[in-house]
Amino acid sequence: MDTVKILEQLCAAAGVSGAEFPASAAALGLLGKYAEKAEIDAFGNVIGYIGDDMSKPLLLLDAHIDRIGLIVTYVDDDGFLKVSKCGGIDRRTLLAQTVTVYGKEPIKGIISTLPPHVAQLEKHSGKSAKLDDIVIDTGLSGEKAKELIPQGSLVTVDGVFSRLGENRVCTPAADDRAGVAALLHTLELLKNEKGLPFRIAVQFAAQEEVGCRGAVISTFNIDPDYAVAVDVSFAQSKGVEASKAGKLGKGPMIGIAASLDREMFRRFVDIAKEKDIPYQIEAMGGSSGTDADGIAVSRGGVRTGLVSIPQRYMHTPCEVVEITDIENTGRLIAEFIKKGAM
């Protein structure tokens, strides 16, 4: 399994929250190699099952497939698009970016900005744009724009999948396509294992960025005994306090919080030490802000752990992850599965 190629394939797919199908279809094609029973449900979640021995406990593996973006709220008579956020997009990074507008067909555009000479004169220099002030220029006339771009069309900020050094990748949508890639790596490591102690359900959940809705729905239907969610979390960079972030290349971040199962946390730490897998601990308050929170309170409650991949520049078009962190996340979860139920 080439983790870089898998991640590039996943990140290239569209799939803003609420319109995940292109990304879901890409993930389904990859998951189908490991799970004979795999499908996309009515909500856009990708769900697959491995193993059919109903006497074994059911373990759910989760990562979300959606990405942040913008939504077109209005098209004016000059062809400019007004937008609102769809997920927690970082508006500081928006001005002068190229975008793709998913109207009746994909259309390229640019987020309009004033030249610095004019901006300085108008005392706008150095200020972050408010979403209400942002417009997208597609180069189309008002009539053509209104024909091709209905209100409600979704927008992604363009970015380039790039290698940074030997082991790092810069790309939009690493949150959380990196988590999807990690779980595919887990399944690759387990594909020749016989007699696993769990039945496994895999979900690549929709609409995490707008409220973790997909995971809540599919977890209720799957009804697992245990769950492990995989997401990204903050990695240190210049200006980021060491106490508030992990480190790139230092392994998966094992979560501990009120919403997470402490025995599963201890099991992950013990396995990492036993198998010499680099790891970091991420201590949080009452909730984790991930799918894990919704999964844990599904039905009568699900024992849920969280393993996160360190990432720089979250919710921007240039998210940075380390390939070894993705693969070590997959390896840690594979070893957890082989260890069996607690």
Image (cartoon, rainbow, N blue to C red):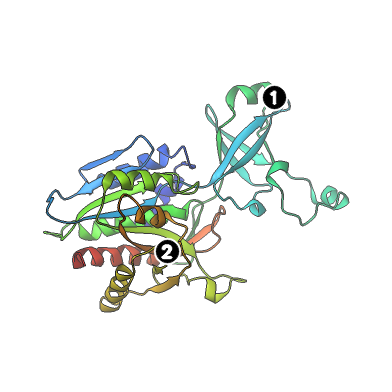
Could you say where residue 131 lies in the image, as x and y percent from the top left? 68, 45
Q: How far apart are marks 1 and 2 (CA)?
A: 44 Å
x 25%, y 63%: residue: 334
Residue type at numbered disc 2: Ile
Q: Is residue 80 left or right of residue 46?
A: right
Q: Is residue 228 left or right of residue 143?
A: left
Q: Quadrant of residue 56?
A: bottom left
Residue 19, compared with residue 222, is above or below; it is: above
x 20%, y 43%: residue: 36
Query: Can residue 260 be spotted in the picture?
Result: yes
Could you say where residue 234 lies in the image, as x and y percent from the top left? 51, 65
Query: Which quarter of the figure is the N terminus placed in?
Result: bottom left
Residue type at numbered disc 1: Gly
x 29%, y 43%: residue: 221
> Tag 2: Cα neighbours inside 10 Å, few (<14), some, or many (≥20)?
many
Q: Nearer the viewer, residue 273 or 263?
A: 263
Q: Are the residues tagged 1 and 2 within 8 Å (C-beta)? A: no
Q: Name the residue under label 1.
A: 142
> Tag 1: Cα neighbours inside 10 Å, few (<14), some, or many (≥20)?
some
Mark identifier at residue 309 = 2
Mark identifier at residue 281 = none
Q: Is residue 226 left or right of residue 292?
A: left
Query: Which quarter of the figure is the C terminus placed in?
Result: bottom left
> Which sits earlier in the primary sequence, circle 1 or circle 2?
1
Q: Is mark 1 on a helix, strand or loop?
A: helix
x 22%, y 63%: residue: 337
Q: What element carries label 2?
A: strand
Query: Can residue 249 be spotted in the picture?
Result: no
Could you say where residue 19 lies in the image, as x and y percent from the top left? 46, 37
Q: Which of marks 1 and 2 is in front?
A: 2
Residue 68, compared with residue 285, is above or below; it is: above
